[in-house]
Image (tube, grey):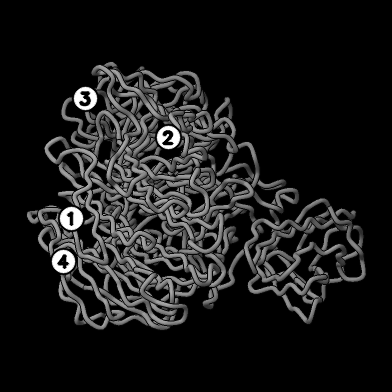
Amino acid sequence: MRRTRILTAVLALAAGLLAGSPSALAANAPRATLAADTYTWHNARIDGGGFVPGIVFNRKEKNLAYARTDIGGAYRWQESTKTWTPLLDSVGWDEWGHTGVVSLASDSVDPDKVYAAVGTYTNSWDPTNGAVLRSGDRGGSWEKTDLPFKLGGNMPGRGMGERLAVDPNKDSVLYLGAPSGKGLWRSTDSGVTWSQVTNFPNVGNYVQDPTDTSGYANDNQGIVWVTFDESTGTAGSATKTIYVGVADQANAVYRSTDAGATWSRVAGQPTGYLAHKGVLDAVNGYLYIAYSDKGGPYDGGKGQLWRYATATGAWTNISPVAEADTYYGFSGLTVDRQHPGTVMATAYSSWWPDTQIFRSTDSGGTWTKAWDYTSYPNRANRYTMDVSSSPWLTFGANPSPPEQAPKLGWMTESLEIDPFNSNRMMYGTGATLYGTENLTNWDSGGQFTVKPMVQGLEETAVNDLAAPPSGGAQLLSALGDIGGFRHTDLTKVPSMMFTSPSFTTTTSLDFAEANPNTVVRVGNVDSGAHIAFSTDNGANWFAGTDPSGVSGGGTVAAAADGSRFVWSPAGAGVQYTTGFGSSWAASSGIPAGAIVESDRVDAKTFYGFKSGHFYVSSDGGATFTTSAATGLPSGDSVRFKALPGTKGDVWLAGGASDGAYGLWHSADSGAGFTKLANVDQADTIGFGKAATGASYQTLYTSAKIGGVRGVFRSTDKGATWTRINDDAHQWGWTGAAITGDPRVYGRVYVSTNGRGIVYGDSSAAGDGGSGGGGGTDPTPTGACTVTYKITNQWAGGFQADVQLTNTGSTAWNGWALGWSFADGQQIGQLWNADWTQSGAAVTAKNVSWNGTVAAGSSVGFGFTGSWSGVNSKPGAFKVGDQSCAVA
């Protein structure tokens, strides 16, 4: 589901965080090079956690598949590992909306080419227009064409499609269906330029809710899919017959038979419905269409399936159930390209008791279901579910029949049979991406096995993070839609989200600094308590009691010793309690809606912030006084924290581009704040283990420093900063939360709005992160070791990571690593080092921020390149004249 994800972006925009001019997205566009330590980045594994509205298989090359998400970017399938590789982590802060992918197209003429139509909202929530991204290396790098209108990757109707399509005969021709009355668009130069198809007769008219004034539910859903009849063209010439789906219940399907020169409404078509999908079987001459009375992906109460005979113009209702018996719309339409008479579709909006999947092996003449009732409420399933890799998908439920846990799914708008493998099917849900590799058991009377096929695809929206200094939990998270998790191992999927009680969205959490076994979380829930407590480091939970009027989670703070709590919920004023919230009393002197935090040393000291004012309580939250501090941000887009181990040491980040915006520090419990002059803008602040020899904990922030947006670290109390991410790792908007690890120097946890929990580890952690340096004439001496790893490979292209380790006894002040390729490989793009290539010989040299490599420490860089025939790894490396061991 994605209801809460809408709110995340809205709040950020309303606070003015995202104002400013957009920057170029293309990976090969010029960017500032301010950076520091070399970091490796991973996800704290959850696996999924969000809606997958689109899955696209390439029709020419086996095992080449992509998935699109509504706010979390796009992914490419990696067959060798059965995992997904993220493709849009390079999207930066100013263009965060380009993490919403409304459509994706893989070129069946040249499989190296892939296109993505990006943009999250069509209203003012998204500050930038949409764009079409194009890649010639399967998403390894992108070029961008901005559009003169917005696109809606997280808008109503986002499960329909695909809106973007490549002509299967002449791949320089692409079509894009636009929302908001902007019509049909065409490119004739492989996506570089676009123009509106001005003679297309219908821009659509369907809106989800005409009474909505936000621009969200009342937007015209527009042109929703484009499908080519490949049999009406030859290689190199434009396909003649093209079908287009329009969000218009009376006029849903249009056709051109002259390669887009003219268009007409297809005669005889059914009315009263929206065409969610249009899939063409050119072998048998059928266009299949899945209809719903609503745009989805949440709504839909009636539906039908129809088949159109392209040669005769005959329409046939092939619905697997009578319209009167539907309480859902149809979507998830697919054809088995190995056996084109086999067709499948989903009841995408059947929330209860489960989704339904339908299958026909005779072009829709007869159908079978994934499950049937035996005697109500009992079910017989044609499938088995194995969620052992993501056990939280049961949601901790123990439902009564006919419901089952885990569910087969909901919001199942995307379902695709592998065009090269009739046994493999993938489909997206509101929480994960499922798949099977023995689908044809369905036809032989056996059961097919459904498993999550989602590893690597991390899609949660993160609201808050906490890393306790002790206990089994490495990380505690507050997430949208699925509540949150306790990670005891970042590389493993937790067995279950927070339960007892369960929140749909957790908005805030905290632990007692001196007693990390005591944890509190608050969140949104349809009914029941909005607050929960744990006394065993977040492993088990029990519900607290709500004060009168509470309607949402808000923010919460735990006293340093866990003896009391202060809560600022939605719907009620700030409250305080001793013990575990069996009764609450109203705090005085602080306004409703204030952000609250605790001092990490003094158990009776709490802090608050609201509308430019800082508040302090010294009596456990009973009364607050207003600080005399001035010059703080006037809005409420602020996050602040108190430093562990030092009473009254507070850091505050936030603001907006039209006012005060930056990072402030107080050493006197907020009585006064000093703004850091070297920080342009800051949105989060967190603390981690101090560097070796440092007297102050490490600071982390998502900020703009030196004119560059990024994730930064300071080991000297903010006097200097080093950027620790790079342009390939930006993840759109990272303004919700950040925290360092109190037990591992250099480790930082970063929130994203749709790419899950990202954590980074420093390659220079062994030297205390001193950073610095980079000599212009690197002449290191002593031993070295190189690890060269091909992390991804496709036809004609590959990606590799290189780690260089100083195994000698003295530090390097600058380095240059040389090697030769044996098979004609050519580097296309390299990051975290300067590089040159002459023939087979390559030299990668440190940049300004990673030249100093202490004895025993490592530095890393990566690159994408091309290959043909063989892609063997280099067998020898040198730093200067010193040969390195190859690991």
Q: Which residue is mark 1?
A: 274
Residue 634, visible in the rendered structure = no
Q: Residue at x 63, y 65 (%)?
A: 795
**Which of disc 4 and disc 3 is earlier in sequence?**
4
Comparing labels 4 and 1, the label whose residue is closer to the camera: 1
Q: Residue at x 32, y 76 (%)?
A: 147
Q: Which residue is mark 3?
A: 547
**Quarter of the view holding residue 434:** top left
Comparing labels 2 and 3, the label whose residue is closer to the camera: 2
Instruction: Give, as a three-letter code, the residue at label 4.
Output: Gly
Question: Cα distance, mark 1 to mark 2?
Answer: 29 Å
Q: Secondary structure at mark 2?
A: helix
Label pair 1/2, CB-CB below 8 angstroms: no
Q: Which residue is mark 4?
A: 204
Comparing labels 4 and 2, the label whose residue is closer to the camera: 2
Q: Which residue is mark 2?
A: 442
Q: Secondary structure at mark 4?
A: loop
Question: Cα distance, mark 1 to mark 3?
Answer: 45 Å
| Dot 3 crowding, Cα within 10 Å, few <14, some 14–19, many 20+ | many
**Which of disc 2 and disc 1 is earlier in sequence?**
1
Instruction: Give, as a three-letter code, the residue at label 3.
Output: Pro
